[in-house]
Amino acid sequence: MTITGDVMEDFSQWFHSILEEAKIIDSRYPIKGMSVWLPKGFKIRKYVLRELERLMDKDHDEVLFPLLIPETELAKEGIHVKGFEEEVYWVTHGGMKELNEKLAIRPTSETAIYPMFSLWIRSHIDLPIKVYQTVNTMRYETKHTRPLIRVREITTFTESHTVHETYEQASQQVQDGIAIYKRLFDILAIPYLVHDRPSWDKFPGAEYTFAFDTLMRDGKTLQVGTVHNLGDTFAKTFDIKYEAADGDHRHPYQTCYGLSDRVIASLIAIHGDEKGLVLPPLVAPTQVTIIPIIFKDGAEDVLYKANEIKDILKDGGFRVSIDNRDLRAGKKYYDWELNGIPIRIDIGPRDLKNNKMIITRRDTFTKEECSLSEDIVSNLNSCLSKINTNLKEKAWNFMREHVVEIDSSDKIEEIVLNGNVGLIKWCGGYDCGKEIEDKTNLDILGVQGEAKGECINCNKNAKHTISIAKTY
Ligand code: P5A
Ligand code: ZN
C-alpha cells in the first residue's frame, strides 16, 4: 500500500489516505464527522498539546467546565445563540424521562463559563482572569465534514477566556493571544496569515475577530485559530460586574481565543509528502529510528552497538526506537518514511568496522556519515534543529509564493483557483465586500493593510488591501 492521491493535484484524497495509512485516526466510526484517535495520532496530539499548554500555562490557569449548558444560559446572548443555533446538539432526555429543560452540548463554552464568572468576580482585585481548557465540543456542521478539518465532535478544543477591567486591557490581551499562537505555529513550522476578519465573518457576539489562516497544498486556506475581542457584550448579558478602585460598579471587558484539531491537520498536511508523514522533531512520536543492517556474520556485534546507541540517545532525551523486526531493510525504510520519523540511523557490519553510522534525514533524504566516537547526542541535536529550520523555511516559502497581488476583477477567480491567496484593493464597503464574495464564490479573509488607488470592484477610493481565497 502507498499513499494515494498526489499532494498537489488531489490533496483531499492524499490527506485521507495519509491519515489512514499512517494510522493517525480511523474515520470509519459510524457517526458522520466523528473519528477515533489511534495510538500514533494520539501521541502527535499529545506532543502538540504539550507545547501549547507550556505556552498557555505561563499566563493562564487551566480549568475544566461541564459539557452541558442549560438552554436558558445558551439563549441569553442573542447574537451568539443566533450564530450557533443551527449547530447545537441537544440532550432532551435522561433515560426515558424528558428533561424539564433541554441541555445543550457545548459548541464552545462562553455560555457555560460566563455565568460562573459573574459569581466569581466582585472587585477589581479579582481581575484579570485568564483561564483555558482543552475539551471536546460538538457542532452539527452542515458543510462537508472532513477528518480533523471540519468535524462534528471537535476533540481538541483549547479555548481561552479572559476578563479585564478596561477595554484597552482586553485589546492588549487580543494581541497577547495572537503572540501565543504565533509562537505555537512557529514551533510547529506552520506558516500563517493573520487577518482582521470582515464584520460579516466575526465570531457571533464579538466586536472583532483576528483569525489565523494557513495555506493547504491545494491552494485552499484553512482557518486554524481565532482570537476575539468580546467587548462588554457578554459581561452585560451575564451580569458580570466588578467594583472599581473608585467604588463604581462596572462591566468588565472580555476576550476569548481557541484552537482545534485543525492545528494537527495542518501539521500533517503542510509537511507531509507522497511517501507519508514528515513531522517536526518536537512533536514526532519517534524522533530517531535505528535500523541494524544484519547479515549472517557479525549480527550480534551490530545489534549490540545499535542498542548501545539507542541507550545513549535515550539518555540524551531523544524518543528513539530500534527496528529489529525480521523484515528486509526496504520494508523498514518504507515504514520510516510513512511514519515521518525525522532521523534514521543505519548501522551494518561494515560501518561498525569503520567506526561509523549513516544518518538519513526524512525531510531531505540526505545522508551523512557520523563517527561513532563523536558526541552522538550533540550531533543528532543539531541535525534535528536543522530539520526544523528546513521545514519552517520550506513551508513559509510555499505560502509566500502563493500570495499574489491581483489588479483586475476579472482575474480574481482564475488566479485564486490556481492555488493562490489573492491580494486585492477594497473600498471597505460592506455591500461591496459581499458582492466580491458572491461574484467570485470566494471568501474575503480580511484586511492585510492600507491601500491607495481604486477598489477592485466598485472603483471608489480603496481603503484596504484584503486577502481573498478559496477556504476550507
Ligand atoms: C474561541 C474559543 C470560538 O469558538 N470560543 C472559545 C471562540 N471560536 S471559533 O472560531 O468558533 O472556533 C475556534 C477555532 O476552532 C476551529 N474550529 C473547528 N475545527 C474543526 N472542526 C470544526 N467543526 C471547527 N469549528 C471551528 C477553527 O480553527 C476556529 O478558528
Ligand atoms: Zn468597493
Image (cartoon, rainbow, N blue to C red):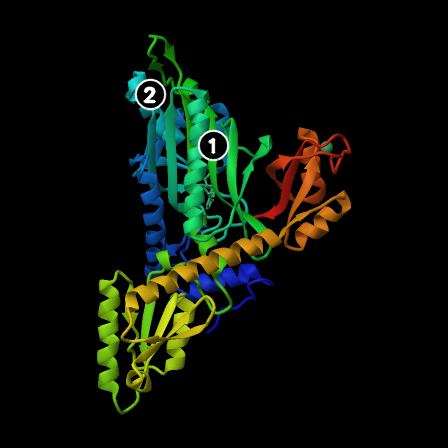
User: Does residue 150 appear left or right of residue 129 in this picture?
Assistant: right
Q: Is residue 429 shown above or below 95?
A: above
Distance in Å between CA atoms under marks 2 and 1: 20 Å
The residue indicated by pointer 1 is: 228
Q: Nearer the viewer, residue 389 or 68?
A: 389
Q: Residues within 10 Å of mark 2 (few under 14, many from 20)?
A: some
Question: Which residue sits at x=56%, y=35%?
Answer: 197
Location of residue 106 (image quadrant): top left
Q: What amino acid type should be assigned to the residue bearing mark 1? A: His
Q: Is residue 287 visible?
A: no
Which sits earlier in the primary sequence, circle 2 or circle 1? 2
Q: Is residue 79 left or right of residue 173?
A: right
The CB of the residue at mark 1 lies under 8 Å from ligand 1: yes
Q: Is residue 224 above or below residue 463?
A: below
Numbered badge on residue 118: 2
Residue 74 at x, y percent in the picture: 41, 28
Query: Residue furthest toward the bottom?
Result: 297
Q: Amino acid at mark 2?
A: Ser
Residue placed most toward the observer, 327 or 99? 327
The picture places residue 82, in percent across and down from the top left corner, at 51, 29
User: In the drawing, does residue 262 fall left or right of residue 39?
Assistant: right
Q: Nearer the viewer, residue 125 or 338?
A: 125
Which numbered circle lies on residue 97?
Answer: none
Q: Is residue 307 above or below residue 199?
A: below
